[in-house]
Image (cartoon, rainbow, N blue to C red):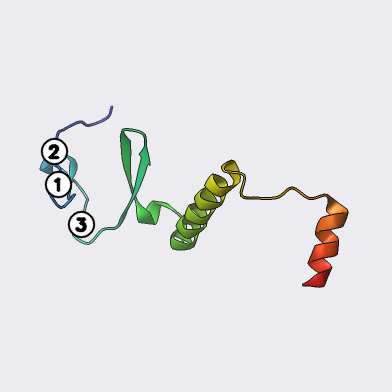
């Protein structure tokens, strides 16, 4: 069963994890924060792979590219046209 408690966000955006939920958490532990609408999830960074920083950077670049795509910032090309332009590089 999930453990639940409450906390308050400081003026600096800091969140204190209540003592009742801090079992096994050590000072300096790194966490990934995931936000989806009004849901925030904390997950220990070491629970991800060794390439976490690279994966997060890639996810950010992908998000930026997707937003640009939605605005019409990319041009569709056929395979032949793409390969032809690629050969010029």
Answer with left or right where residue 20 lies relative to residue 67: left
Residue annotated with mark 2: 7
Residue furthest to the right: 80
Q: Earlier in the sequence, mark 2 or mark 3?
A: 2
Front residue (pair 32, 61): 61
**CA–CA distance in space, label 1 to label 3:** 13 Å
Foreground: disc 2 or disc 3: 2
- The quadrant where residue 39 appears: top left
- The quadrant where residue 17 appears: top left
Residue annotated with mark 1: 16
Residue shown at 56% from the left, 46% from the top: 66
Expressed as whole percent of the image width and height from the top left, the position of residue 81 reads 84, 56
Q: Earlier in the sequence, mark 2 or mark 1?
A: 2
**CA–CA distance in space, label 2 to label 3:** 18 Å
- Dot 1, crowdedness within 10 Å: few (<14), some or many (≥20)? few
Answer with left or right where residue 31 lies relative to residue 13: right
Tag shown at residue 26: 3
- Dot 3, crowdedness within 10 Å: few (<14), some or many (≥20)? few
Residue furthest to the front: 72
- Dot 2, crowdedness within 10 Å: few (<14), some or many (≥20)? few
């Amino acid at each position: 069963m999930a453990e639940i408690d409450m906390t308050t966000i400081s003026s600096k955006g800091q969140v204190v994890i209540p003592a009742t939920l801090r079992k096994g958490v050590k000072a300096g532990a790194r966490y990934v924060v995931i936000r989806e609408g009004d849901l925030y999830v904390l997950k220990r960074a070491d629970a991800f792979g060794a390439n976490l920083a690279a994966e997060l950077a890639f996810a950010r670049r992908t998000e930026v590219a997707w937003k640009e795509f939605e605005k019409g910032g990319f041009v569709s090309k056929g395979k032949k046209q793409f390969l032809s332009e690629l050969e010029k590089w």
